[in-house]
Image (spheres, rainbow, N blue to C red):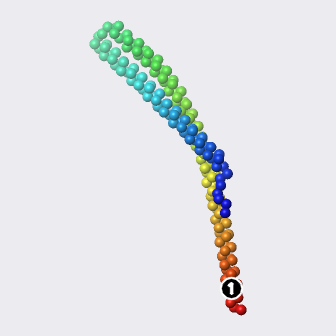
């Protein structure tokens, strides 16, 4: 009896490797997205802290020249935050692209695996039929031997 051999084993392995690479790319993009979002949150927090310090200085009625560095810092942080928001948006788009690529490669791999499962089921059905045929033949041979032996004993 022939051993089961899936003809598309090589393409299946290629699809598995492709899926693994796409998964790795997706996880790297996701890590970068989270890093950039964290950096954005840190910038927003620094801006809020500077704003709070400036308001405290205003409550203490300080001179305007002491508030000037806070205003410059706040403007600089606003520019940095805007740039970081653009970066986060770009990284999010890349991350979404990677996710779609990963899902596409996963579906392709699953298709090949379903084909393999289907062919393996067909192979098992064929093997069972062959085994049934062999056992029927053996039973038939044994029966005819018993009949021959019984006919010889009668004479």
48 vs 30, left or right, is left
Judge by depth and name the residue closer to the eye, 116 or 145. 145
Identify which residue, 84 or 120, lies in the foreground. 120
Q: Pinpoint residue 130: horizontal percent, then vertical percent.
A: 67, 66
Is residue 103 visible to the viewer in this orientation of the structure? no
Q: Is residue 146 visible?
A: yes
- Crowding at label 1, few (<14), some or many (≥20) Cα neighbours within 10 Å? few
In the rendered view of the protein, which quadrant contains the N terminus? bottom right
**Residue under the image location 53 percent in, 27 percent down:** 90
Residue 129: give x, y in percent of width and height.
66, 66
Q: Quadrant of residue 147?
A: bottom right
The residue to which callout 1 is attached is 149
- Name which residue lies at 48% across and 33% down: 31
On screen, residue 24 above or below 41: below
Q: Residue at x 60, y 40 (%)?
A: 18
Q: In this image, 27 relative to 126: left or right?
A: left
In the figure, residue 119 lies in which quadrant? Answer: bottom right
Name the quadrant containing residue 118: bottom right
- Above/below status of 6 relative to 74: below
Residue 3 vertical placement versus 13 (above, below)? below
Residue 86 on image: x %, y %: 51, 23
Q: Which residue is most to the bottom?
A: 155
Residue at the far left: name it: 60
Q: Could you tell me residue 43's position as x and y percent? A: 42, 23
Q: Secondary structure at mark 1?
A: helix
């Amino acid at each position: 009896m022939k051993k089961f051999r899936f003809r598309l084993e090589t393409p299946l392995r290629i699809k598995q490797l492709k899926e693994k690479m796409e998964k790795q790319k997706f996880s790297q993009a996701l890590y970068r997205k989270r890093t950039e979002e964290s950096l954005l949150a840190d910038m927003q927090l620094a801006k809020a802290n500077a704003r709070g310090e400036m308001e405290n200085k205003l409550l203490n009625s300080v001179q305007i020249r002491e508030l000037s560095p806070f205003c410059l810092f706040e403007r600089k942080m606003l520019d940095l935050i805007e740039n970081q928001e653009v970066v986060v948006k770009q990284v999010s788009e890349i991350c979404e692209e990677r996710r779609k690529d990963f899902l596409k490669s996963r579906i392709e791999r699953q298709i090949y695996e379903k084909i393999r499962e289907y062919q393996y089921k067909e192979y098992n059905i064929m093997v069972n039929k062959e085994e049934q045929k062999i056992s029927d033949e053996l039973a038939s041979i044994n029966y005819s031997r018993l009949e021959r032996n019984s006919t010889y004993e009668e004479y």
